Image (spheres, rainbow, N blue to C red):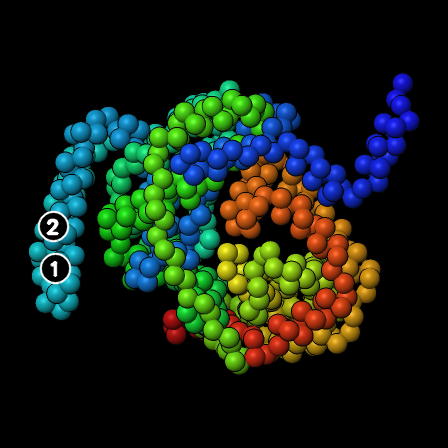
Amino acid sequence: MMSRRTAAILLVLALLPMSVRAQLGFAERVVEHRLANGLRLLILPRKQSPTCAFYILHRVGGVDEENGRTGVTHLLEHMLFKGTTTIGTRDYEKEKPLWDEIERIYDQIEAERAKGDRADAERIAQLRQREQELLQQVSQWLIPQEYDRIFERAGSPGTNAWTSNDVTVFTVSVPANRLELAARMQADQRSNPVWRQFYQERDVVLEERRQSVDDSPEGALWEAFLATAFLVHPYRNPVIGWQSDVSRLRTADIDRFFRAFYAPNNTWLAVVGDVEPERVITVVEKYFANIPAQPLPERRIPEEPLQRGVRRVVVKMPANPQMLMGFHKPNAPHDDDVVFEVIRGIFTRGRTSRLYRELVEKQKIALSVAAYSAPGERYPNLFVIDAVPRHPHTVQELERAIWREIDRLRTQPVHEAELNRMRNWAEADLIRQLRSNEGMATQLLWADAVLGDWRELFRFVERVRKVTAQDVMRVARKYLHKDNCTIAVLETAPEAQR
């Protein structure tokens, strides 16, 4: 029979907010371990299913790139799936001389291109022909997509990766009994990569950029928006890179970048699922401990100067109109960033939010409206309002309506019911993030690497609970004004004007 003391403890726990109960449970279960080479390991045992997520984060993104070499982080992410000295090849010793010769051919191609108008087109064509001959020869030694196929044969749903302004993340989920395979494969990927098919992959990325930016109205608008909002900070650069930069990247660029930033002392690893922490630590030590730490490059990120007036940029493409409004603000975990999360919810979270109710439902001048923080979290960023007008209404009408709502936020305290709704949203978001191994691994890595401590996941909800109506008014007055605003507009233009 349950004792009175035990029953009292359970009652107290039941009355706590869900986020606090989650924090107490996870704080006890997350195991932290740091290898001698600096790699930080986070382990969360969960017995929901016999699987585990094995996620790796490198604290490097577009923000760390040099001018003239934008896009190198994203291209490097692609290249790491090309295999190693033992994966993706039938005989690496026989394929390597062919790649070396292709590299020498590109030395000559680049030297010829550097002549500008005096470049010998026939000479470049001959070199290209020789490259194709070498690619045909080397193909006999290649095993395409072997990296992914090994995981698929082991019962994994597949591998993936993504690059942002702040970080690069590699993901794989495997049956729990294939944990060692995941560790061995991921460690080999970081110890013995081979940059095979580099120039073909560079062309793939250039085509990806063409589709997602050059031929995409939304992509072109976003790129112009960031380049206008940020004058000196590298958040102004697209993660995929500027076309002129990507087209000049060489194998040596990604190799140098890899060796500088993919060091274990700049790496986080999260293992979440049906695992035993002691076993995970043993396996990770076995495969990752021998990767040497490296002195990390000095990051001299320029500080964005204070904006002193509204900035505007117009992009003309054959597409429906759209507008972006951005306001400079602090990044997480600054207290004002938490207030902006509340403002985001008040403005655009759900059908009862202010901008949705006013612009979409009541005035019917917008098809959609959203708010979010972008483009990163490691440095001060933007609070963005993204809106699409409903024909025949214009972006100018939208802008005026949005400024009216901003002025209302600056001058009138928000209702307690709105704040309570945002507190509930924050808690619901946390619970959703905890549902899957993959979601939990992502959140642990991001919070620990970007915010400095995985516990910020849970602290955030409690901090949202403390935001007051006065906090909202103070932050709105401080940041949401025209001298701190950048506005990007997508105007419809005939196809012939492109």
Provide residue 451's location: percent of width, then percent of height. 55, 51
Q: Residues within 10 Å of mark 2 (few under 14, many from 20)?
A: some
Q: Amino acid at mark 2?
A: Leu
Is residue 313 rendered to the left or right of residue 209? right
Query: In the rendered view, does 463 fall on the left or right side of 35?
Result: right
Q: Percent position (x, y) of residue 6?
A: 85, 27
* Comparing labels 2 and 1, the label whose residue is closer to the camera: 1
Q: Amino acid at mark 1?
A: Glu
Instruction: Identify the image quadrant of residue 373.
Output: bottom right
Residue closer to the observer: 423 or 352: 423
Residue placed most toward the observer, 186 or 372: 186
Residue that badge 1 annotates: 112
Residue at 44% from the left image edge and 33% from the top image edge: 35
Q: Secondary structure at mark 2?
A: helix
- Which secondary structure, mark 1? helix
What residue do we see at 36% from left, 55% from top? 298
Residue at 53 percent across and 63 percent down: it is 381
Quadrant containing the C terminus is bottom left
| Quarter occupied by residue 142 | top left
Q: Which residue is mark 2?
A: 127
Of the two numbered discs 2 and 1 on the same chain, state the one appearing first in sequence.
Answer: 1
Mark 2 in CB contact with mark 1 (< 8 angstroms)? yes
Q: CA distance from mark 2 to mark 1?
A: 10 Å
> Is 279 rendered above or below residue 224?
above
Q: Quadrant of the N terminus?
A: top right
Residue at 31% x, 44% y: name it: 259
Camera sees residue 393: no
Q: Position of residue 350 (x, y in %)?
A: 72, 57
Let me know if residue 157 appears in the view: yes
- In the figure, is residue 368 to the left or right of 281? right
